Image: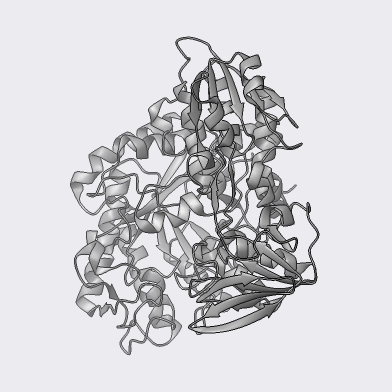
Amino acid sequence: MSPTLLSPLRVGNLELKNRMAVAPMVTCYCDEDGMPTEQYIAYHEARAHGGFGLIITEDYAVDPLGRGFWCAGLWKDEQISPHRELTKRVHAAGAKIFAQIYHCGRQTSAALIGAQPVSASALPCPSMGEVPRPLSVEEIHTIVGQFGDTARRAREAGFDGVEVHGAHGYLIAQFLSAYSNKRTDSYGGPLGNRVRFALEIIADIRAKCGNGFVVSFRISADEYVVGGRDLAETKVICQQLEAAGVDLIHVSAGTYESAWAIIPPLGTRYAWLAEAAAEVKQVVSIPVQVVGRIKTPEVAETVLQAGQADLISFGRASLADPDLPRKYAEGHSDQIRECIGCNQGCISILFLNQPIRCLVNPSLGYEGAAEIKPAAVARKVLVVGGGPAGLEAARAARLVGHEVVLRERSDHLGGNFQIGAIPPAKGELISYITWLGEELQRLGVTVRLSSEVTPDVVAAERADVVVYGAGARHVRPPIPGIEGANVAEACDVLAGRVPVGHRVVVAGGGMIGSETALYLASIGREVAIVDRLPGVALEENAARRRFLMLELERLKVEEVVDATITAISDGAVRVEQRGKARALPCDTVVLALGMTPRVALLDEIEGMTDVRAIGDAVEAADGLVASREGFACGLAI
């Protein structure tokens, strides 16, 4: 019979209690010296308590000059003792833990590390732009020893193994690939030379840690860049890694230039690397681990059943719900809070070197704060608005013991967030709203839909606290003709509340405008986007924007950028573009020129009781801000 997620797995001399692993993800929860903080330890401990059999930490730099973020480190002996607390608590919670060890090579900046980045060759990473210094053979040998020393420190700190990071375009991958390695010495040229650095690292780790210490190797099956390493070479490398003593192969994909493959956004197919892992599995006898948009246990089970991998990585899924394995084991898969692939809190802010957050899990990063404490006095709370902020406020207020009523003026939950799920590839957003609605029902929150809130309703509810999260509405700037019958707002168009002609001009090329344009083009409309900026969807996450722009191009959406709308008439939109006037023929103009708080009711009820505004009702922002604001507000009542 095929193994299941709940069956044990032997990796080297180590037995994992199940086949669910937390993938390595940088958190920026450590201090600037790479030391673990309580926030960092509690984050891992929560996932161990949640039932994961294996936790793989973020990148542990083997040298402070090898960091690409303020990530953890084991580059000096002083870092061993603080990490013993991490491994002790993870073990006490029932999980095994590996330290991922790496050197980022050229995928960093001098501003971060205070020195010129290094690499196999003097070729800049296209995403970072800085020309690295090529390593000398002597320096290569030094870094090989640093990997071995870091692994030795990990063993002394109580880690069960290390994962050598040879994927994602970091230093080892830079040597492995002809895309980044143009050396003519014994470390460059044919694959046998390019793999030498990796094999020497494995040998040094084995010499310093012994054969009983588990060593995994993470590799990009395909780099998805022109001239990059592909699956054919990857399979040869994996055979050599096994012969060198590696116990586990962890299959991923991509480099910084193809970051969409490292962290594929919503709309990417699930388990998309399972076929690549299966090919690796056919040429090695050691276990194979796979990552890549495997966000539910049910999808993970099909990968195991098909014999494509032995161990499943839950990356962003473990951020969204640290209790995923426990819920699955207890038969409560329906209560798992699914990752929606938005990449807002875990990726976009990470590259600003800020601690990661999660839109659907506002408790991420606060695991050690013991936020949920019974309220001193149970109060009646009225929540106005059923968007993410209001729903999270209602959930949190109920968790601390208050009586909660939520009123939403439409006939469904989600607010503008639900409307945001309508464009192509955005349907996963609905899972978050569905989970919140079901969670409120489980908690005993009273939810009243199609319930317009007025000052009389607020008075009748006799609530001690009113949480106002009525969201935002579209901005309507003073453009001549903007009140015409042929002008509609993006939210109304997406919700199907207004008819739209064949030729459409979308005013505004931000996230709302560009995705509305994509939706309209996908249903056969002829669409043009007008925006004053030099491009559209510029605030989108890079991976999501890549797919969006490809679709806009495929559907022939015209982008009129560096342009300002000067007037709207019955059959055209007049714009000024780079000093020249032009007219865009259209049947319908769709407004997506920004959002502004909906505050009319807030002004009316202010002073009636304790009123607290949250989310877009304070300032139009994204769901990441709204969910945390709402949750924090509910806890604070």
Q: Is residue 264 above or below residue 30?
A: below
Residue at horizontal 63%, vertical 49%? 295
State the residue in front, 497 or 569.
569
Name the side, left or right, on which 517 lies relative to 523. Answer: left
Query: In which quarter of the view is residue 273 placed?
Result: bottom right
Residue 88's place in the image compared with 571, above or below, is above
Quarter of the rendering containing residue 525? bottom right
Rendering coords of residue 294 (x, y %): 63, 52
Percent x, y for residue 258?
Answer: 50, 71
Instruction: Report the front residue among 432 and 517.
Output: 517
Residue drawn at (68%, 60%), measured in percent from left and top? 425
Give the farthest residue toward the front.
Answer: 480
The x and y percentages for residue 344 are 50, 53
Q: Is 80 placed left or right of 169 in the picture?
A: left
Determine the residue located farthest toward the bottom in the rendered image: 184
Please give the name of the residue rendered at 55% of the width and 25% of the height, measured from the top-left corner: 605
